[in-house]
Image (tube, rainbow, N blue to C red):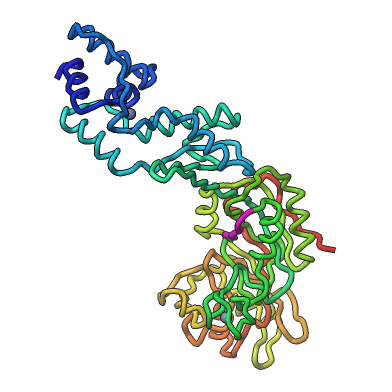
C-alpha cells in the first residue's frame, strides 16, 4: 500500500493524535519526532486528497491523550527519584494491554513494516525530560536507577541497581561462618532454639562487613559473594580471600573506599578485617564464584602413635603431584552431590611440630578437601595421610593463608594490621 493510502486507512479507525500516527511509521526518517512525522503525514494527506487540513482535536483512540501528559510524567518520575543518589537512569513503563493490542491490530491490518511501539516513544520522551530536569544521563546498559511508570495506575516504581565492591577479607577468629546461616529449626523466622534471631550464629563475615556498608549507603541489605569459603572453624589469614559485596538498593552511591574500609575494620573489632580494592560489577561476581583459585593452608595435625617429623615429611611427599580421588566428604554430603572428584596437591610440607602436633602447609588445587586429605574420611579420600601412615591422622585446626586473585586488583594484597 502506498504511504498516503496507509495514512488514509489509519485515519478511518478513529481520532488519532500526531504521536500515534507518526509512530505507525516511526522507524522511517529517524531525525523527526513522531509528532512532527504524524503532523506532516496528516498535512500531506490533506493536500493529496485536496481537502481542508484540520488538526485532530478529539481524544486519541490508541493512547487516550498520553502524550499530552509527558511533562506531568516527568514530574512524577523526578519526585519518585528524590532523595536517591544516582548518575544514570533509565525509564521504563507498563503499558495497559488494550493499548498494545490496539496498535498491533493496525500494524497487522495494514502490514506496516516500520512502526515503533508506544512504550519506546514514551520511555524516550520522558527520559529526555527527566534528564534535562535532573542533569542525569539516560543509560540503557547499566543505569543506576530504573523508574517504571505504570500507565494504567499512574504510579512510578523505582528500582535501584545494586552497587558492587571488590575486596579481600581476613578472618582472625574461628567459629564465624562466611555468610548468614539460617536457623535449621525455623529457617530464619525466629524460634526458641535460635533465641528468635532466626540465625545459627550471631555474626558472620558477611554481616560484619555488611552492617557498616548498609549504614553508609543507606541500603536495604548487602550480600557477600566470596571466592570460595573456609570452614566455620578455619581462620582466613595471609593474603586474605577475594570477595565482592553486593550493596542492595543503595540510596547513596558516592563514597571513598578507604573511608568505607576503615569503617568496616573499626566496626568488626579485629575479628574480621577487609581491604576494599575497587568498584566492581556483576560480571566479577561470576568470575570469582567460578572458584578456580589455588589455595594454601596451614594446618595442625594430630597423628595416633609415635611418628617423627621426618617420617611424616616422607609420607607427605608421596601425596605431592599425585591424583587424589575424593568422594564428597561425609560432612558436606547433605548439601553437595555425591561424586568422586580428582584433585592435585601442588605442594605439601611439614614445617614444624607444636605440642606433639604436626604443623603442615599445603598448596592445593581449587576444590581439594584438606581435612579429608589428612583423615582419609573413612576411605572416601584416597590416597590420604592416614592411609600412607597406616595410622589415624586428623586436622585439629586449619587456617587458609593464600587465595589467588582471579580478578585483577589495583593494590597488592597486604597483611591487615588489626592492632
Ligand atoms: Zn495517541
Ligand atoms: Zn530458629
Q: Is residue 9 above or below residue 292?
A: above
Q: Is residue 10 left or right of residue 215?
A: left
Whole-percent x, y for residue 362 in the image: 63, 70
Quadrant housing the C terminus? bottom right
Whole-percent x, y for residue 217 in the image: 67, 51
User: What residue is at 69 percent from the left and 61 percent from the top?
Assistant: 211
Q: Is residue 91 above or below residue 26?
A: below
Whole-percent x, y for residue 281 in the image: 55, 47
Quick one: which residue is furthest to the front in this view?
Answer: 58
Q: Quadrant of ligand 1?
A: top left
Whole-percent x, y for residue 190 in the image: 58, 78
Extent of the magenta region = 219-225
Was residue 224 drawn as part of the magenta stretch in this picture?
A: yes
User: What residue is at 47 percent from the left and 45 percent from the top?
Assistant: 155
Q: Quadrant of residue 70?
A: top left
User: What residue is at 22 percent from the left and 12 percent from the top?
Assistant: 45
Was residue 34 drawn as part of the magenta stretch in this picture?
A: no
Q: Quadrant of residue 193?
A: bottom right
Q: Is residue 131 left or right of residue 166?
A: left
Quadrant housing the N terminus? top left
Please say whether residue 385 is visible from this viewpoint: no
Please give the count of numbered marks on the rendered protein.
0
Please say whether residue 70 is visible from this viewpoint: yes
Please tell me which residue lies in front, 214 or 57.
57
Quick one: which residue is furthest to the bottom in this view?
Answer: 305
Q: Is residue 97 left or right of residue 9?
A: right
Please tell me which residue lies in front, 99 or 169.
99
User: What residue is at 53 percent from the left and 31 percent from the top?
Assistant: 130
Please tell me which residue lies in front, 300 or 215.
215
Q: Is residue 199 above or below residue 143?
A: below
- Overall secondary structure of the magenta stretch? strand
Amino acid at each position: 500500500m502506498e504511504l498516503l493510502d496507509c495514512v488514509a486507512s489509519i485515519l478511518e479507525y478513529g481520532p488519532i493524535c500526531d504521536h500515534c500516527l507518526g509512530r505507525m511509521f516511526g522507524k522511517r526518517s529517524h531525525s523527526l519526532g513522531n509528532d512532527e512525522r504524524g503532523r506532516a503525514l496528516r498535512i500531506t494527506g490533506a493536500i493529496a486528497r485536496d481537502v481542508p487540513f484540520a488538526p485532530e482535536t478529539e481524544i486519541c483512540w490508541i493512547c487516550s491523550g498520553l502524550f499530552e501528559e509527558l511533562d506531568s510524567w516527568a514530574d512524577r518520575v523526578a519526585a519518585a527519584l528524590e532523595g536517591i543518589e544516582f548518575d544514570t537512569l533509565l525509564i521504563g513503563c507498563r503499558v495497559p494491554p488494550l493499548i498494545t493490542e490496539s496498535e498491533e491490530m493496525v500494524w497487522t491490518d495494514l502490514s506496516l513494516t516500520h512502526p515503533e511501539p508506544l512504550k519506546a516513544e514514551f520511555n524516550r520522551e520522558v527520559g529526555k525530560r527527566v534528564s534535562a530536569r535532573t542533569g542525569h544521563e539516560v543509560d540503557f546498559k547499566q543505569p543506576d536507577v530504573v523508574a517504571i511508570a505504570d500507565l494504567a495506575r499512574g504510579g512510578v516504581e523505582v528500582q535501584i541497581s545494586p552497587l558492587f565492591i571488590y575486596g579481600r577479607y581476613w578472618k582472625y577468629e574461628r567459629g564465624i561462618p562466611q555468610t548468614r546461616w539460617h536457623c535449621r529449626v525455623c529457617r530464619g523466622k525466629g524460634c526458641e532454639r535460635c533465641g528468635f534471631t532466626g540465625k545459627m550464629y550471631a555474626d558472620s563475615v558477611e554481616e560484619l562487613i555488611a552492617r557498616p556498608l548498609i549504614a553508609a549507603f543507606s541500603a536495604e541489605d548487602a550480600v557477600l559473594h566470596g571466592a570460595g569459603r573456609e570452614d566455620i572453624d578455619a581462620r582466613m589469614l595471609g593474603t586474605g580471600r577475594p570477595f565482592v559485596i553486593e550493596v542492595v538498593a543503595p540510596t547513596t552511591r558516592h563514597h571513598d573506599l578507604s573511608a568505607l574500609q576503615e569503617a568496616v575494620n573499626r566496626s568488626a573489632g579485629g575479628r574480621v578485617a577487609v581491604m576494599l580494592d575497587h568498584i566492581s560489577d556483576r560480571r566479577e561476581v561470576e568470575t570469582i564464584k567460578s572458584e578456580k583459585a589455588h589455595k594454601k593452608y596451614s594446618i595442625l595435625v594430630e597423628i595416633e602413635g609415635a611418628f617423627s617429623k621426618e617420617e611424616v615429611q616422607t609420607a607427605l611427599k608421596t601425596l605431592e603431584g599425585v591424583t587424589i580421588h575424593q568422594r564428597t566428604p561425609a560432612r558436606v554430603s547433605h548439601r553437595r552431590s555425591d561424586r568422586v572428584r580428582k584433585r592435585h596437591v601442588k605442594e605439601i610440607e611439614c614445617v614444624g611440630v607444636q605440642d606433639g602436633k604436626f604443623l603442615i602447609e599445603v598448596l592445593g588445587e581449587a576444590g581439594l578437601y584438606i581435612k579429608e586429605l589428612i583423615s582419609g574420611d573413612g576411605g572416601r579420600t584416597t590416597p590420604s595421610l592416614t592411609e600412607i601412615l597406616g595410622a589415624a591422622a586428623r586436622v585439629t585446626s586449619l587456617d587458609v593463608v593464600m587465595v589467588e586473585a582471579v580478578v585483577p586488583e589495583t593494590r597488592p594484597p597486604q597483611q591487615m594490621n588489626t592492632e
